[in-house]
Image: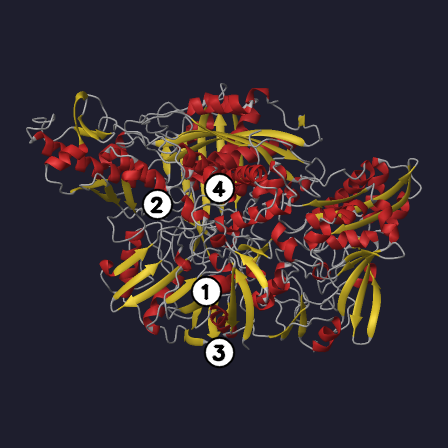
Amino acid sequence: MSLSINLTVNGAPQDITIQDARVTLLDLLRERMALPGTKKGCDRGQCGACTVLLNGKRVNSCLTLAATLNGAEVTTVEGLAKGDSLHPVQTAFIENDGFQCGYCTSGQIMSAVGLIAEGQAGDDPERIREGMSGNICRCAAYHGITKAVQEATRAMSDTHTGDVK
Amino acid sequence: MPDTLTSPARFGSNAGQPLTRRDGIAKVTGVANFAADNSPANLLHAFYVPASIARGRVTHLDVAAAEAHTGVTHVITPQNRPPLQGDPSEKVTMFSFRIEVLQDDTVRYAGQPIAMVLAETLEAATEGARLLNPQYEVEPARTALDQNEPISVPPQGFGTPAGAEHGDVAAGHAAAVQSIDVTYKTPAQYHNAMETHAVVAEWDGDKVTLDMPSQALNMSCAGYAYFFGIPAENVTLRSPYLGGGFGSKAFPTGPQVLAILAARLAGRPVKLMLTRQQMFGPVGHRGATSQRLQLGVDVDAALTVLDHEGLAETSTFDDFIEPAANASQGLYAAGALKSVHRAVRLDVGTPGPMRAPGEASGSAALECAMDEMAELAGLDPLEFRLRNYADTEPGTGRPYSSKALRECYEQGAARFGWADRPLEPRQMLDKNGMLTGWGMGTALFPCPMFAADARATLRADGTALVETSAVDMGQGAWTALAQIAADSLGLPMEKLEFHAGHSALPDGGVAGGSGHTATAGGALHAAGSDVIRQLGEVASNDPASPLHGAGNAGFVARNGRVYVEGDESRSDEIAAIMARAGSLDVVGNGSASRPPEVAAKHAMNSHGAVFAEVKIDPDLYQIRVTRMVGAFAVGRIINPRLTESQLMGGMIWGTSFALHEEAKHDPRTGRIMNANLAGYHVPVNADVTGLEVITVHEDDPYVNALGIKGVGEIGGVGSVGAIANAIWHATGTRVRRFPIRIEDLIRG
Amino acid sequence: MKTFDFAQPTTVDEALAAWEPGSAWLGGGTNLVDLMKIGAMAPDKLIDIKRLTGLDQIETLADGSTRIGAMVSNADLANNPDILRRFPMMAEALLSGASGQLRNAATVSGNLMQRTRCAYFQDANAACNKRSPAQGCDAIGGVDDTAAILGWSNQCIATNPSDFCVSLAALEAVIEVQGSSGKRDIAFADFHLLPEDTPERETALQAGELIVALRLPTEAGDFAGNSRYLKVRNRTSFAFATSSAAAAMQIKDGTITKARLALGAVAAKPWRLAKAEALLIGQAPDPALFAQAAEAALAGASSSNDNDWKIELARRTATRALALAAAGTPARMPALPASPFVDQGDSLNA
């Protein structure tokens, strides 16, 4: 059965036909929309590599069926920077070496953006650690990740009014 | 005449700088291209059926049901699999494994590929594979170390470690006034790089292009070429980034060979990406071990004997025997040393090297045993280790190329506050009533070099291109190797174009054994030096150059100038030499490896000391590692930022080994029941707090021209023991199995 | 994953009409989609209930009870200021579960319907009476460490993995369901079923019935000052409980006037402990009393799979949870919700 949805991805509304209701948002992005920045690490919601923002909130795209998303807005790692200008979280990940191989990084960054928007962790390292625990990093760049989220949180509250977008 | 390889390389302003990753922007914006991110036109998706039994035979596959599923194009089984030109049951090279590519219907371990389905979509391929609904003739599975007889496998190099014996072991036992005899068990662990194994294969006649994560590009090309009966140069392997490797991505695997075969069969590009569950089987793992350690000391607490017997699992069809017992060689000055390795053949996929093979498992047991011995001797664990400090390599008496372990102990202990540690266990409570314990472990990891080639091209415009098929799996090769290359040419980083991760480049060797920066970096350094030598020679022949008559060798480059080595007064600008010479590109080639006679002369190791604090709930026994200080002496640091990250990552692998990782086989079916990231735990962010890394300065004139020792694996080595020993110190309970869990402590 | 039909109704009535045998309700999908991928569930039809109107509200009803729509996300519920103030233990339980991403997607009713994490249930190649009645139970004698110590049968030793449900059992929530024959309430204690001889029957829902809301009675707010959820596990976060407990008290003038205690990860349902509660009421909070209550709580426990240690751990978990509840609900949600470890409050380098 084929399904049509309208999906806004990284600001661009698109009409999308999927042949099959089995398709997850992750596989839609990676295999059908040429947006492979979002990564598959477990495909079961157990690692966080596939994290995207769905209507502004971080979710695991591997467990989200594309068929359910008519009218939704999705932000992926490809949509975070504004031209050459990196998002503060991206900058902070580079500065704090919050990654090694880079494979979980898209998910880490989207999760961090989501976490900061949720506003529950602030710049408290323990709350950041807890809030980022849905994103596994096998290289174990956690020390840098926590510092990066802390620094980005501070940078964003300095230059913005707490509004992530 | 100094007894060194060469005079230490003169470095410019790049090496030693904590540069951020040159691939950083690509990775944070999602444009870094990993293998499975590629989707060429007309792509087919592959999915394979993993065996759900560990031993037996496949008796039926419902091929018709799979073929009937919409989108399925091919079902490949042992009955119709196209032939391979190379025999998968042969070892292609010493560094390869026998693989399973549907040779027949036998099942040798759970997770072995038993059929592959191709389809127009990933969903259809996945469901097609499920519909095959395999039926089996089942034989009893053997997946635990006590389920088969221990055997001795003759040492033949990689995977079949030789033991070692130095001194009179019997006399060492007899001379002991105190001794321990303890057995430690370590479980099967799986690499689980975040990026699962993948390949996108596309054939063009008898040439094939593979987008595939690889820790050894050129060696892999040769391996795949063997199976397909084509010259190695017909295989193009692109691996610009790996989503982690940890030893699992250096060898051809069955699933990847099958996908390449499927692409040739279908005449279309094929993409295969293993599921997380499929990572538990055909792509290697750290084999389970049982290690018996017998230690004895004299009245001064000097070790009279260090006797380490390792028993490790291997598969029924190939050999990789965890060289755990060898961890007891080379570290402590025991009167007699013995390391023995035996194996048990089990119905499991063949184990393989996993980050710090041998050392990780062996050190876990050794460092705990050292702690037990210190306890018996009534000594502080650090004091006990210092009493047995080796100033030359134990057994052989060879000098160390460098060894700042004493400084590691001192600096690590000072930073940690080790001096305040009570000797007895269960003495410390924190303000919340948590049992608090401090433990330590020594880290040692060898500094091997492999072989690598590189090319450097200095262009007329003053920029340079440097090339090698080196691998960045997260350790930072894109950055650190470029720093080395830039220095060899005397150029700033922005003048350097660095190409790696492609098999058409000069062979960058293997990213493994913590030797990649030393080896590929050595080749790059040699290539750059070759360019500078040629440039110096050009200048020497040029009457207009201040270097006129300087000869045809003995030049170094720095800050855009070529100098006569050792004579700061004689130099010329690179751009000026190039301009006068008519602006031709200067191409230099370089190689690096360590000659056997050099390797034989010194014991070459990185060293470290790790101090850990754990807190444990006194009733519930939940454990948290709250602090770790690791002090490491690892030779020249090319990039302190990336080095710290690697060492921290290694230390967290220590936490993972000590507290989390364990593959659990069902005792009846042999299937791994926790083959997923919810069941097979690795640390999450909340498990990591209070990490600190100290790098102790070390100049090593022998290890290689650049003085690089490598940092990829040593971080995890001492950490496991440090944490386990801290758990004992907190609770008074000595757990002799890993991982250490709540239930082990509550059982007491 | 098997192919399936997909329906996306917008009203509860449409949803109920769309239901047919073999259908499954799809909420956040965090459990169902996963189980479909691994073949542990294979519905013929998914009915997306996320768009049903009126199921995403949190409201206080005229009688003082709190009504939570079935499609409220776990994150929205846990971070709702009113919920945090009145039912902090429930919020703590929610925040101790899964990850930030999963809590954003997972729904209230989905959490109630969450299936066991027993590895043998999840493995389509293993025998499981829950997945396929009368097939047998490979978990018995297996290596799954989530096995039950209470209420198990020789047909099934699986446990319910939910944290949220443990708090709901303690707070005596009521579940509102709607079916083709109308609406009805199910008391929380009656909702999840023990395996006995029919482990495939996990809840009191009838075929085609839909959970539309959850109600917390007014009395559930009496525990705001003295209630905690405690979750013991082998990883600091993002792990299912090895054992857990929800403890709640009302303490007046140094005497426990009301008490609630439920255990998690020990049985096929959250294990409410009325006997232990009765021991507490009328007494002064005291460590010995808590130990005595916990002892009573585990009186009927038995090892299902060489897991005697878990009985001891559950007893200690209950004791500690009671002590934590008696000590008072923290003013702010702990940095590590439900963890035995309190906030390190540290800088990055200790």
Amino acid type, residue under disc 2 in the picture: Ala
Instruction: Point out which mark residue B70 bears.
Output: 3
Measured from the top left, where is residue C237 in percent x and y?
Answer: 63, 45
Measured from the top left, where is residue B68 in percent x and y?
Answer: 48, 80
Give the residue number, with chain letter if any, for mark 1: A31
The crowd level at tag 2 (other Cα within 10 Å; few <14, some 14-19, many 20+) is: many
Q: Which mark is first along the chain, 4 or 1? A: 1
The crowd level at tag 1 (other Cα within 10 Å; few <14, some 14-19, many 20+) is: some
Q: CA distance from mark 3 to mark 4?
A: 43 Å
User: Is A62 placed left or right of A103 in the picture?
Assistant: right
Amino acid type, residue under disc 1 in the picture: Glu
- Which quadrant of the structure image shows residue C335? top right
Whether labels 3 and 2 belong to a single chain: the reply is yes
Q: Which mark is first along the chain, 2 or 3? A: 3
Residue B149 drawn above or below residue B391:
below
Which quarter shows the N terminus of chain B? top left
Secondary structure under tag 3 reads loop
Secondary structure under tag 2 reads loop
